[in-house]
Image: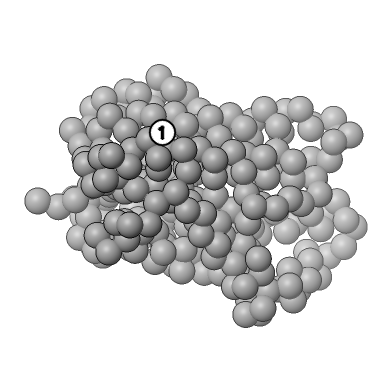
């Protein structure tokens, strides 16, 4: 019988790359996301690989009732990948600062808690939980207070869950990517460039210059680490926040 993986934010970026990696490894994958059309497009893009094994559900992770309803209808799972998230920029004095804070914490941190709490009752013993945090979960950045706080919180949540579920041989680890070649990063570069009054291409070059390997991380490289953390070989690794940054941090 195929193992089952549930991946939030599976419609694009790291989530979609991770879905592909798990499908190639023989898993049945549930892809969750707020936008059902985006998930449908992702499934279409996976082609034959998705046939009968990439199942999708439009779930808003910030809606605890919706999350509970999804997992209540799931018999069991072997792997949970908490990948969803938003990255909005706002300085402390900007008019939208409070709204950005509330929305970011609701989705990135409360949403992660909702998903992990609900999944814990359904995940099999010796299962795996991997959360997708960020380099801003181990450091900060101007005008990214909400995002950084949510990812620091996600790391703490992951480490605490690892200790609680260890008696069941369930591991929980976070990955902390630096700059990754995704739509979210591209939009973040545009937003930051506007705030700083420079061209996005110049900010991109600046970001790449700070990465020792000289390039952004590929989503597939994050997916490979997530897949390995879900393996039997990684059974002794838990409660860790693993940097994937090309040496940037």
Instruction: Residue at 68% x, 74% y: name it.
Output: 211
Residue, disc 1: 115
Q: How is the image coloured?
A: one colour
Decide if residue 166 is on the left or right side of residue 97.
left
Q: Kindly tell me whether residue 36 is visible in this rendering.
A: no
Residue 156 to residue 212: above or below: above
Provide residue 44's location: percent of width, then percent of height: 33, 55
Residue 64 to residue 197: above or below: above
48, 248: nearer the viewer: 248
Provide residue 231's location: percent of width, then percent of height: 28, 60
Residue 124 to residue 233: above or below: above
Location of the C terminus by quadrant is bottom right
45, 159: nearer the viewer: 159
The local secondary structure at tag 1 comes to helix
155, 180: nearer the viewer: 155
Provide residue 107's location: percent of width, then percent of height: 55, 34
Q: Kindly tell me whether residue 149 is visible in this rendering.
A: yes
Q: Outermost residue toward the bottom?
A: 213
Q: Quadrant of residue 103?
A: top right
Instruction: Residue at 67% x, 27% y: name it.
Output: 102
Instruction: Residue at 26% x, 25% y: name it.
Output: 72
Q: Outermost residue toward the top?
A: 65
Instruction: Residue at 32% x, 33% y: name it.
Output: 120
Provide residue 180's location: percent of width, then percent of height: 58, 63
81, 35: nearer the viewer: 81
């Amino acid at each position: 019988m195929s193992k089952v993986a549930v991946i939030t934010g599976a419609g694009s970026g790291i989530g979609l790359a991770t879905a592909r990696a798990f499908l190639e490894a023989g898993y049945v994958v549930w892809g969750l996301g707020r936008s059902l059309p985006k998930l449908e497009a992702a499934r279409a893009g996976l082609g034959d690989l998705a046939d009968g094994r990439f199942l999708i559900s439009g779930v808003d992770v910030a809606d605890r009732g919706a999350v509970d309803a999804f997992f209540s209808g799931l018999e069991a799972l072997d792997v949970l990948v908490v990948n969803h998230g938003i990255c909005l920029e706002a300085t402390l004095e900007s008019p939208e600062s409070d709204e950005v804070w509330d929305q970011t914490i609701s989705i990135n941190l409360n949403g992660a808690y909702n998903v992990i709490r609900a999944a814990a009752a359904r995940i099999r013993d010796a299962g795996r939980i991997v959360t997708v945090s960020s380099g801003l979960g181990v450091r900060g950045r101007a005008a990214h207070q909400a995002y950084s706080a949510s990812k620091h919180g996600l790391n703490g949540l992951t480490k605490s869950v690892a200790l609680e579920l260890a008696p069941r041989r369930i591991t929980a680890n976070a990955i902390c990517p630096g700059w990754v070649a995704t739509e979210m990063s591209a939009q973040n570069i545009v937003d930051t460039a506007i705030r700083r009054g420079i061209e996005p291409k110049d900010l991109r070059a600046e970001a790449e210059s700070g990465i020792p390997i000289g390039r952004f991380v590929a989503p597939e490289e994050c997916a490979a680490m997530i897949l390995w953390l879900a393996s039997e070989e990684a059974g002794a690794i838990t409660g860790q926040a693993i940097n994937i940054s090309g040496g940037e941090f």
